[in-house]
Amino acid sequence: MSPSPPSLPPARTVSLVTLGCARNEVDSEELAARLTASGWELTSDDDASVVLVNTCGFIQAAKQESIDELLAAASSGAKVAAVGCLAERYGSELAGELPEAQVLSFDDYGEIGARLDDVLAGRKRPAHVARDRRTLLPITPAERQPATSGVPATSGVPASYSSTVVDPAAPWTGPGGGVFRRRLSGGVVAPLKIASGCDRRCSFCAIPSFRGAFVSRRPPEILAEARWLAANNVRELVLVSENSTSYGKDLGNLRLLEEVLPDLAATEGIERVRISYLQPAELRPGLIEVIASTPGVAPYFDLSFQHASGRVLRAMRRFGDRERFLALLDQIRDRSPEAGVRSNFIVGFPGETAEDLTELELFLSHAGLDAIGIFGYSDEDGTEAASRPGQLEQAEISRRVEEFAALADELMTQRAESRLSETLDVLIEEAADDGLPGRYLGRAAHQAPEVDGVTTVVSPVPLTAGDMVRAVVTDSEGVDLIADVKPR
């Protein structure tokens, strides 16, 4: 009898699934670069030997989606690992509930290739015990730099970079040889993370406890990554963080974002820079001026209002009320009348009254927002709001969401209609799939990717992805616009 041929080791192939926000997209691209550098092959095939799920832990619906994705991956027969916010937030608790998956921490990102080797070999590592990551860095922001101990690997990157752009076909590397990012998708738009963590203590939000204290990335590092993205055919940068208006405070310069934005906009190949996640309480006049008037920076204000009743906002441990928020919008439109503004709002917060809802309705009716997100309150583990009196029944929260979502749709439609005859700068992303010739999909300055509307551009000449064209709005469909290319 001839001897059996030796069995081959399983292929080191990994399918990377990303859930949640643009910050998670950047994390996934950094994980992809590290995996590639350690010899793992990324694949979208169903027969990958390991499925790595970058989870979201923001709200209950996102948590459930993450769990469903992990269970679906396990049912395919692949080995499964969980990273991201849900994994970090619950650690060993999640591992106990989902023995099908290896649960990894942010602290594992730097050695992600070795961690997946363990997963592939069936070597089960004890999951981390969840902890408040805010305690891992000094309370005083100025004492956090240059220390990176305890910060997710996505923040612990060297602070000095050459101005030379590396090979755009290769992952982005730092001067020490570390591999930090590999694009997972094409497209002319990419997120660029400027900071990690948050120092605010909103009573409904658990994100700071598992993302940690606020840490800014240094300008040379951000600018170098912007050049690398431009070399990869990116034309719009979307700056992301948990709170972009705090950028620079741990580097001793609260005006640093105002200084960095023009430099980013001047990056060769970049047509537009957009900033997201702005805190109304921290939005300074100087920053408004830079966003509203700097060529290449979108006059776009992603403002986290959350409500308009001063009483509810105080219970949320936030600043403001209807009058202050409307005054802030007046400041913005004094500088840029056509500026885009979007915001999200929570209804059904514990103790919210009919008078509070009236304040919110009045604000929305007068604010002229381009994009409005309405979310129902849900308890988050470990937050102050979860134990507040005045908790509402889920049916009542759902009723309020439905009522305000309908109002939001009506107001956004009216705002889109008000842009008829405006001349917009539209970044073309792809040809329209409606079968009609000369039609392209793009986004104007007031339209962020994924969350806002789009503009269908009608052009007598062929356009390609990445073109920035001037177009006149001729019609609207809900939040979406239709515009004709303006003759030169």
Image: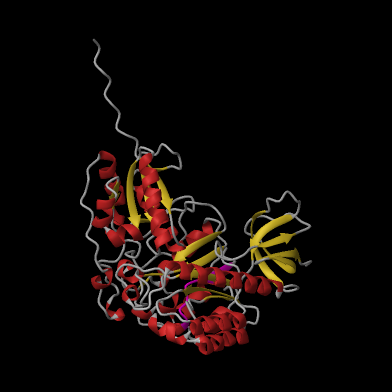
Q: Quadrant of the C terminus?
A: bottom right
**Residue 247 lies within the magenta run:** no
Question: Which of these two is toward me, 301 or 305?
Answer: 305
Would residue 303 appear left or right of 317 to someone viewing this image?
right
Q: Residue at x 44, y 38 (%)?
A: 46
Q: Residue at x 50, y 59 (%)?
A: 229
Question: Which of these two is toward me, 91 or 382?
Answer: 382
Q: Residue at x 54, y 52 (%)?
A: 186
Would residue 283 appear left or right of 426 to someone viewing this image?
left
Residue 423, by quadrant, is: bottom right
Q: Picture coordinates of residue 34 (x, y %)? A: 35, 52
Q: Relative to residue 167, is residue 49 depicted above or below? A: above
Q: Residue furthest top?
A: 1
Magenta stretch: give its range: 272-280
Q: Relative to residue 30, is residue 276 depicted above or below? A: below
Q: Picture coordinates of residue 95 (x, y %)? A: 26, 52
Q: Quadrant of the N terminus?
A: top left
**What number of labels is visible?**
0
Q: Relative to residue 233, is residue 2 depicted above or below? A: above
Visible in this render: residue 377?
yes
Would residue 471 appear left or right of 66 to someone viewing this image?
right
Q: Picture coordinates of residue 363 (x, y %)? A: 56, 83
Q: Picture coordinates of residue 362 (x, y %)? A: 58, 83
